[in-house]
Image (cartoon, coloured by chain):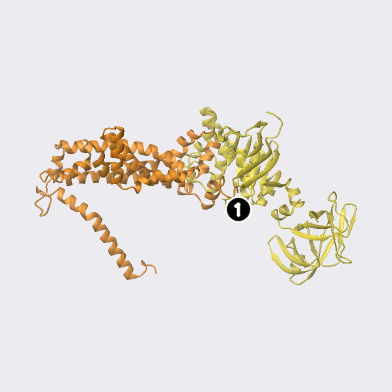
Chain colours: A orange, B yellow
Amino acid sequence: MNMAASKSGRGLLWTSFWLLVVFLYAPILVLGVFSFNDRDIVSFPWQGFTTRWYEGLFDNQQILDALRTSAWIALVASIITTVLAIPAAIALQRRRFRGKAVASGFMLAPLVVPLVVLGTAMLLLFNYIGIPFGPITLIIAHVIIALPFAILTLTPRLERIPVAIEEASRDLGAGALTTFRAITLPLLAPAVVSAFLIVYVISFDEIVLASFLAGTTTTFPLYVFSQLRLPRQLPQIPAVAVIVLAVSTMLVVSAEVLRARSDRLLGEGQLRVDEDDTATVVGAPLGAGGSM
Amino acid sequence: MNDGPAISLRGITKTFGDVVAVDDISLEIPEGEFLTLLGPSGCGKTTTMRMIAGFEDPTAGAIYLRGEDVVGVPPNKREVNMCFQHYALFPHMDVDENIAYGLKLKKVPRDERARRVQEMLELVGLAGYGARRPGQLSGGQQQRIALARALVNRPAALLLDEPLGALDVKLRLQMRLELKRIQHELGTTFVFVTHDQEEALSMSDRIAVMNHGVIEQLGAPRDVYEHPESPFVADFVGVLNALELRIDEVTGDDAIMRVSDTERVVVPVAGTGVTAGSTVLAAVRPERITVTSIGDGTTSLLKGRVEQVVYLGTLTQFHVQTSLGRRVIAHRLSDDGAARITQGDEVSLTWAREDGSILRVG
């Protein structure tokens, strides 16, 4: 019945859990080990501890350029995506309008369209209308593929903000814009930060569309991939990967900590929407029952 | 300021698709009145209030606030404020900021703002709570802050949407008195929406009983309770006995049905057009029925057998099978006399003629 309840079931669960952990994290661990291995070829045996791959990074202008390029492209893409995602999420979660299902479908479609197809299509389109391949086309492409992730990150938080709170603000004399700035946005802020970070990581990491649309621009993933053919520099790649991993982990963890703390500050009860509340506040204006 | 009503609804109708939520309601609410919209879920009371607040626009009809037509005016430009069902306090602001929100938007100077917030905190009995966050307050305290946040703006009317629904029973009783005291102190017009008849009866100056989008009866609590004008009102407001009567005789303003030599039911029928031979549905409240041992001769009298006795604390409830062929519920104070009457006893039920009323003719 309940797998976790029986003794053998529990053993099975633990086994599969540890298998998953090993499969997920062993490669990363190996990467970390190689980044400190004093050997010119990325493989065993262990030949002693060194930090020279890390030291060498700061002299490798190509790596630094690639990192810088990816960093600012990701920054611009995540700002644009987040700014677009907020009104989109509000429209999809709060408003009712004709063609909502279609609009929602179009905005979330990039989740399921194969990147190769998207890349080919954009390549043809940008070439046809004459946008030069480079940072601009990369930013456009990254905004499109990251938008659904941003919207889906914002929506659950938005669902937890009762409509009545926004109505209370309007009732007390605030216009729609003031209500958004003073009430909705501050309450949504933790999800906005999460959305921003997720989009940043997606863009920073993106290689398929970059292969189609980068032109002569070299983003970090493109650089790493190109270096796999040059064995002499190869040991630096694990080192830079470890740094990128450490920085992004730190960002995500601190964002989570911030979010958890702000949730606590708000008080769980305040933002939780009771079932009957949803029925009256959200459903009342247009629900079949009409009113309460 | 004019001397006209605070709020005037003229023939307002609201439809959502095919559903008629509010059907041609007209209502005048004088300044300073405590008016309750009472009715079951889906009767249109909340929609009516949301139209006054400006969250819905009527499909037809006009709404006047202090003589000014406000249809089409957004909620932030209307001189009414609302208390929401689940308080809807701003969780990221402290109590002071919550209450000062409306004043800040109206650009009230800082000193005056602080003074008025302080006044309100004292009015609702929460002085010293200004620095707390809503999440740190109990439900009852949040309710008071929501009240203060609305009243600090000195609205032409305060709209309350089932504000006590989320509180536990004891707190609810306490908040009823509190609300009434605050309303009396400030003299603000209150429009109170509830489905709880006890709340409506205990606080209101007038009650509008709503059903299916129309006002079935409008009147003082005593009128609505004691003289319901329709079966719905009678049924919704309190426990009630509805009796199908065939009138034998009309003398003056009284219609009489003779059930037997000694038993009769008498109801006042002035202006209803009831004549001898009419069938009417009449009503009488359980607590107006005297349950005594058979013998004396008051105006309405029915004999019956006690089928069930329900002890309610202060009152004891008797379910009596009468010679009308219908079960009648009667309440009586749980005194020694009540304790002697048990299941199976023969009793007589009597009540004064003016305690009866006509629900329906024919």
Q: Nearer the viewer, residue B145 or B26?
A: B26
Mark 1: amino acid: Lys
**Quick check: can you spot residue A153?**
no
- The residue located at (85%, 48%) in the rendering is B271
The quarter of the picture where residue A89 lies is top left
Mark 1: few, some, or many residues within 10 Å (few <14, many ≥20)?
Answer: few
Locate residue B258, reporting x and y percent: 87, 63
Q: Is residue B327 above or below residue A240?
A: below
Q: Left or right? Give the position of B77 relative to B349.
A: left
Q: Nearer the viewer, residue B197 or A39?
A: A39
Q: Secondary structure at mark 1?
A: helix
Locate residue A91, reporting x and y percent: 46, 41
The quarter of the picture where residue B186 lies is top right
What residue did someone put label 1 on?
B170
Locate residue B50, reporting x and y percent: 60, 41
Q: Residue furthest bottom?
A: B344
Q: Left or right? Give the position of A224 relative to A266.
A: left
Quarter in which the N terminus of chain A is drawn: bottom left
Q: Left or right? Give the position of A74 relative to A102.
A: left
- The residue located at (71%, 61%) in the rendering is B315
- The residue located at (18%, 50%) in the rendering is A32
Locate residue B10, reporting x and y percent: 69, 37
- The residue located at (29%, 32%) in the rendering is A130
Identify the subunit bearing mark 1. Answer: B
Q: How many numbered marks does the figure carry? A: 1
Q: Nearer the viewer, residue B201 or A213?
A: A213
**Quick check: can you spot residue B117?**
yes
